Amino acid sequence: QVQLVESGGGLVRAGASLRLSCAASGRSFPYPNMNWFRQAPGKEREFVARINWSGANTYYADSVKGRFTISRDNAKNTVYLQMNSLIPEDTAVYYCAATNRWSALTIDMNYWGEGALVTVSS
């Protein structure tokens, strides 16, 4: 019933910017809270950013705070992750996930997208 599709990934050089999009099926998100996670090769999936339904509340991992911005356009059923000042450490597959809980735990996510690869070269 719910499908999340990420887009906007690609290969960029360090210092560049990318904007990821996560589009949900249907007329609106079935779960209010949206998260971005990422998983680098050989590493565990880690939390990146979170946003509530209205967009009034956001939270970021320390590793991306000040560089990444999460936002949403509910009219378009889309959540965004603006990534600025990218560094090679940001290289990973990025996933969006929906939940009705204010949580950054992977086990609390109800739906996941397929992932979008972001590669940052030095």
Image (cartoon, helix red, strand yellow):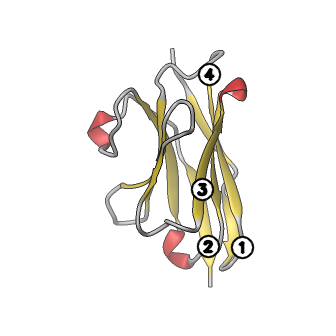
Upstream in sequence: badge 1 or badge 3 = 1
Q: Residue at x 62, y 44 (%)?
A: 71
Q: Secondary structure at mark 2?
A: loop
In the depicted structure, whether residue 78 falls above or below residue 82:
above
Which residue is identified by label 2?
86
Asked whether 19 or 54 is in front, the reply is 54
Q: Is residue 117 above or below residue 95?
A: below
Task: Work out how far the residue at label 1 is from the one at label 3, CA to CA, in angstroms.
Answer: 14 Å
In-front residue for pair 116/64: 64
Task: Work out whether mark 4 precedes mark 3 in sequence or the reverse, and give the earlier one.
Answer: 4
Q: Amino acid at mark 4?
A: Ser
**Circle 3: element type:** strand
> In this image, 50 relative to 116: left or right?
left
Identify the residue under disc 1: 16
Q: Earlier in the sequence, mark 2 or mark 3?
A: 3
* Mark identifier at residue 25: 4
Left or right, 98 with reference to 88? left
Cβ–Cβ below 8 Å for labels 1 and 2? Answer: yes
Q: In 3D space, how far apart are the residues under numbered discs 2 and 3 (Cα atoms)?
A: 12 Å
